[in-house]
Amino acid sequence: MMLSGAGVLLWLVSLFVTCFVLYWVIRLAVRHALRDAQSKPWPGPNPGPNPGPTPWPNPGPYRQ
């Protein structure tokens, strides 16, 4: 299938527009992701290993 000059030009313009739109979508997504990551506080140091179960008897919230 051979394209005419106008067909090739239309194909190139559509390719350019598609790449331009993809560039801006990716750019905005990265920009918002970085902004969201910077706005969240750092969770702090690792608290360490799990200390294990509480000693028996564990009264729990249901016992008075």
Image (spheres, rainbow, N blue to C red):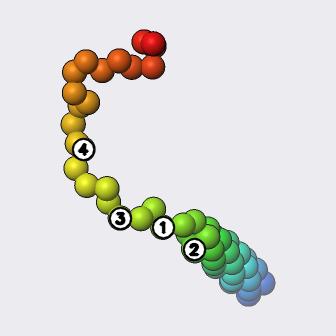
Q: Is residue 46 left or right of residue 8?
A: left
Secondary structure type for disc 3: loop
Q: Which mark is residue 42?
A: 1
- Residue beneath disc 2: 38
Residue at (61, 70) in percent of width and height: 39
> For the residues marked 2 and 3, what is the alpha-carbon distance in whole angstroms?
17 Å
Q: Is residue 3 left or right of residue 55?
A: right
- Nearer to me, 12 or 57: 57
How many residues crowd around disc 2 within 10 Å: few (fewer than 14), some, or many (20 or more)?
Answer: few
Question: Earlier along the polypeptide chain: callout 2 or callout 3?
Answer: 2
Q: Amino acid at mark 1?
A: Trp
> For the residues marked 3 and 1, what is the alpha-carbon distance in whole angstroms?
9 Å
Q: Amino acid at mark 3?
A: Pro
Question: Earlier along the polypeptide chain: callout 1 or callout 4?
Answer: 1
- Residue beneath disc 3: 45
Q: Amino acid at mark 2?
A: Gln
Secondary structure type for disc 2: helix
How many residues crowd around disc 1 within 10 Å: few (fewer than 14), some, or many (20 or more)?
Answer: few
Furthest residue to the top?
A: 63
Check the picture and name the quadrant holding the C terminus.
Answer: top left
> Residue 3 in the image: x percent, y percent?
67, 78
Quarter of image, res 44: bottom left
Secondary structure type for disc 1: loop
- Residue beneath disc 4: 50
